[in-house]
Amino acid sequence: MEELREHTVDGRLTAEEFEQRLGAVYTAKTRAELATLRADLPVSTTVARRAQLERKSRLRGRIVQEAGGAVLASAVCVAIWFATGAHGSFWPIWVIVFTLLPLMRDSWRLLGPGSDLDVVEARLQARHERRIARDGRRGRRYLPPSL
């Protein structure tokens, strides 16, 4: 309905066409029926914005999932450092930096002012494929992240 209103305001639909399509929206039972109502119309900014927000949300979830693993590895290293007497330099900082730095970079690219969803998605996918290959060499089955 929101999309049809936008197309009507932009002059792509007349008031009569809007009323007819709106009635068809209310009687539609499947998504395919809804898709036919907008097949002859260009993609609206509302749909594009919604798709971008859904994609960004999905990528944010994948980053949070990877951050959980990085935080866990860092916490284990800090616990080992404490358990061994916490002498010398704080060596877990290297684990923390190397595990969280890529995630912080991707988070900035995703949530920062010039968000680049394609780059973030490509980096996450590359890390995922490396994990699958590594686990395949070890003989383990790897479950994909929920998309």
Image: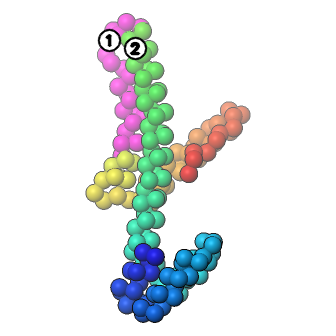
- Image position, residue 119 (x, y; %): 43, 57
- Image position, residue 61 (x, y; %): 47, 46
Q: Is residue 16 magenta?
A: no
- Rendered view: 86 above or below 112: above
At x 41%, y 60%, the residue is 53
At x 42%, y 34%, the residue is 99
Q: Which coloring applies here?
A: rainbow
Left or right of 126 on screen, residue 15: left
At x 39%, y 80%, the residue is 6
Q: Is residue 97 magenta?
A: yes
| 3D distance between C-alphas at marks 1 and 2 | 9 Å
> Disc 2 marks which residue?
81
At x 56%, y 51%, the residue is 147
Start and end of the magenta stretch? Answer: 84-105
> Disc 1 marks which residue?
88
Marked residue nearer the N-terminal end (1 or 2):
2
- Image position, residue 112 (x, y; %): 30, 53
**Labels 1 & 2 near each other (Cβ < 8 A):** no
Select label 1 or label 2 by which is in front. Answer: 2
- Say which of 144 and 122 sits in front: 144
- Rendered view: 131 above or below 34: above
**Amino acid type, residue under disc 1 in the picture:** Gly
| Number of residue marks | 2
- Say which of 97 and 27 sits in front: 27
**Amino acid type, residue under disc 2 in the picture:** Trp
Q: Residues within 10 Å of mark 2 (few under 14, many from 20)?
A: some
